[in-house]
Structure formats: structure tokens, C-alpha cells
Image (tube, rainbow, N blue to C red):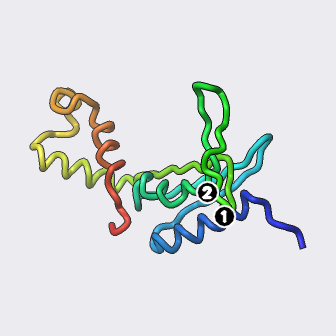
Amino acid sequence: MKERSAHAMAASEIRRELKKAYPTIKFSVTSECFSMGNSVRIHWTDGPTADQIDSIVKKYQYGNFDGMQDLYEYNNCIDGIPQVKYVQTSRTISDTIKMDVKDKIEKLYGIDMSDERAVMDKFGCWPDQLVWRETCKNDYSTV
């Protein structure tokens, strides 16, 4: 029987942990091997924040790249769990959630989000940036 690769085992463990922590959220967990390394990518829509997921999966990454010194530091090696060089997380926010957030901002601040200049004057950013900032910090697991 063929032995499974470290990146496949890490992906499998990450899948198991995420399913246990967030049983109603569908995660895409893929792994790959490349020259001088391997990685696991995790993607989901709505649900928990990236920080919440990172707190679960960061132990599966055995280090990090230091761009100032142009080197990879092996500073998180943990015996007993499969680890990879990079673990990347990516959350997409659905249009439904974006519209809900937009409506809440309009009601809370009495502002028309279609008036880009008014939003820029009040918040210092464009309407889509404001919605993005709000969605990044909220957990939509129970929506």
C-alpha cells in the first residue's frame, strides 16, 4: 500500500478539524506539492472569519517566510501532526451577506450607500471597501 504524502495527510486532518468545529460550513481543502515545498489551501463562503480558521489551522504550517531576510524559518515544527510549508486560507462573502451588511450600514448611519461621495466623506473609503471591512470582522456561521 502506498504511503500518503505529508500534504495529503495535513489536508485530511485540517478537513476533519474544520468539520468538527463548523459542521454546517462547506470547506474546500486542497493540497499540492511543488519544487522545494508543499501547501494546503482552504476556501469557504461566508461562515467563520479568516482569523477563526487561522487559529485552528496555523499549527499545520511548520514555519513562515521572512521576506526581509529572504528565507523560510522553521519555527513551528510540531511532532505528531502532519505539517506543510504553507497553509493558506481564503473566505468569499456571498452577495446576500454583502447586501445585508450594506442595508445595515444605511440604516445605522442614515446614509445612501449608492452615494459614493457621501460614503467617502463620512468613512474615508468607497462603499465596497466599507462593506468588505465590515464583512471581514464578522462570523456568518449561523446565518
Task: Please tell me the numbered disc located at residue 117.
Answer: none
- Drawn side of residue 47 relative to residue 117, left or right: right
136 relative position to 111: left or right: right
Task: Tell me where residue 4 appears, x and y as whole percent.
Answer: 80, 65
Question: Residue type at mark 1?
Answer: Ile
Residue plotted at (38% across, 66% down):
141
* Separation of residues labelled 2 and 1 (CA atoms): 7 Å
User: Could you tell me residue 51's position as x and y percent?
Assistant: 42, 52
Crowdedness of circle 1 by 10 Å Cα count: few (<14), some, many (20+)? few
Which image quarter is the N terminus in? bottom right
The mark total stands at: 2
Q: Quadrant of the C terminus?
A: bottom left
Occupied quadrant, residue 139 = bottom left
Give x and y (percent) for residue 113: 21, 39
Residue drawn at x 37%, y 52% as measured from the top left: 95
Is disc 1 placed on a helix, strand or loop?
Answer: loop
Q: In this view of the protein, which residue sits in the foreground, 137 or 114? A: 137
Q: Amino acid at mark 2?
A: Tyr
Determine the image quadrant of residue 36. top right
- Locate residue 98 relative to residue 38 in the image: left or right: left
- How far across and down, in percent of the image, does residue 134 sit? 29, 46
Q: Earlier in the sequence, mark 2 or mark 1?
A: 2
Task: Find the residue positioned furthest to the right.
Answer: 1
Identify whether 75 is placed above or below 49. above
- Residue in view at x 9 percent, y 43 percent: 110
Instruction: Determine whether 59 is above or below 105 in the image.
Output: below
Residue 60, labelled with which disc? 2
Looking at this view, is 74 or 136 the one in front?
74
Check disc 1 and report the residue beneath it: 81
Asked if disc 2 and disc 1 are in contact, CB closer than 8 Å, the reply is yes
